[in-house]
Amino acid sequence: MNVPTQSVNIDLGERSYRISIGEGLFTTLNACADVPSTDSALVVSNTTVAPLYIQELKSVLAGKGVHVHEAILPDGEAHKDWQTLNLIFDALLTHGCDRKTVLYALGGGVIGDMTGFAAACYMRGVPFVQVPTTLLAQVDSSVGGKTAINHPLGKNMIGAFYQPRLVICDLSTLDTLPDRELSAGLAEVIKYGPIADMAFFAWLEAHIDAVRARDRAALAHVVCRCCEIKAEVVAQDERESGLRAILNFGHTFGHAIETGLGYGAWLHGEGVAAGMVMAAELSQRLGMVDGEFVRRLRSLIERAGLPTQGPVLDGGDNAGRYLELMHVDKKAEAGEIRFVLIDGPGRAVVRSAPDALVRDVIDACCVA
Ligand code: NAD
Ligand code: GLY
């Protein structure tokens, strides 16, 4: 079955762009008026995704008369670092790429975040296009212009806000995504419910099995609705001076899990899933939501094939280790950790919480 191609616009004045969502979009690139015109392009991908899709993308670009180069990076969150980022600059310089060269990020969030950061830095900024091939990247990371690499002491700590010129979400690329990665993407999908749209949350409760079975129409709805919500938030607060932080629901705990275990041990979405349960529990203990909301969230996360409990990061003072890691968070202010909490289903706020309460939540939500 073919789903109709849909568009979501990100309204950011002169930095506005379109997200195109559909099937077989690589082959329709020729018809896209908003593909940045150029003589040369560098497609950045990794050792897993390139063998699957790079030839198709390269030949479409070559058909438009573009001279296409490639940079193939090692795969994985553990490689989202300076050393790997430098491979993109090596390729750009080796091939004599100039300010008009367009970077294409072909892959998941790791490739998207690194390519975007490279595009922001190379010659102080060159155009880039996101071609996300994971569910997580299609519903979240390819949209909104956050780019970054990790530091051993903190996740996504070095980066820039830099918007792509176009996002191409080809749903057919999700066919080859491993089940565990599809589930990881569902964590970022589920988050949009509690923070912004409980009707979408209810839709997910009714259709989660169809989504996990990769029903194309269900996936199209998911990607469109998530991009619409994200577009609305980003248009109001591009650089996260306030509202945009709600998109980090579950991430304060989740980033601590990723950093604490070592990048790549748990997938980003897995950390976010357990982190959302912890943040919801914290919200309940602060009297902001009832137990029924937490039960619904935990149940949907479980049905999505995701963890609802965090790992033990320290056999001695586990809660202390989480707290230590959570202090290295971009939302922290004056040494105080700030959490995205749910203030009634469908509404998120950013606030601090007493350490003792946070410790109770971590103790209740972690398993060895
Ligand atoms: P990922 O990029 O590591 O991709 C997951 C795995 O799937 C990788 O092994 C990849 O090679 C493979 N893969 C990708 N597409 C495939 C396909 N179509 N078929 C088969 N295999 C495929 O992980 P991710 O979950 O896409 O992204 C996580 C990253 O995104 C994290 O680094 C996170 O910090 C970042 N992120 C950024 C933002 C943002 O706003 N910039 C938002 C959320 C997450
Ligand atoms: N993924 C969080 C954000 O884009 O702000």
Image (cartoon, grey):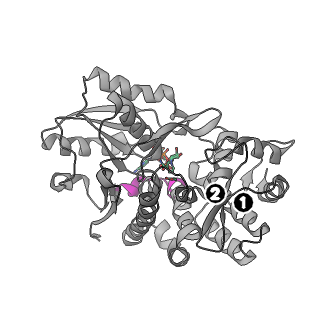
- Image position of 115 with respect to 348: above or below: above
Residue 36 image position (x, y, % from top left): 22, 45
- Image position of 191 with respect to 64: above or below: below
Residue occupying image coordinates x 69% and y 60%: 279
The numbered disc on residue 108 is none
Residue beneath disc 2 = 250
Q: Do the residues labelled 2 and 1 touch (CB within 8 Å)?
A: yes
- Looking at the image, residue 255 sits to the left or right of residue 317; the answer is left
Residue beneath disc 1 = 278
Specify the amino acid type for callout 2. Gly
Residue occupying image coordinates x 43% and y 64%: 232
Residue 52 image position (x, y, % from top left): 34, 45
- Looking at the image, residue 66 sits to the left or right of residue 267; the answer is left
CA separation in Å, label 2 and label 1: 7 Å
Residue occupying image coordinates x 37% and y 47%: 163
Q: Which of 317 and 231 is in front in this view?
A: 231
Rate crowding at label 2 as few (under 14), some (14 to 19) or many (20 or more) other CA atoms within 10 Å. many
Q: Which of 288 and 276 is in front in this view?
A: 288
Residue occupying image coordinates x 77% and y 58%: 365
Whether disc 1's CB lies below 8 Å from ligand 2 is answered no
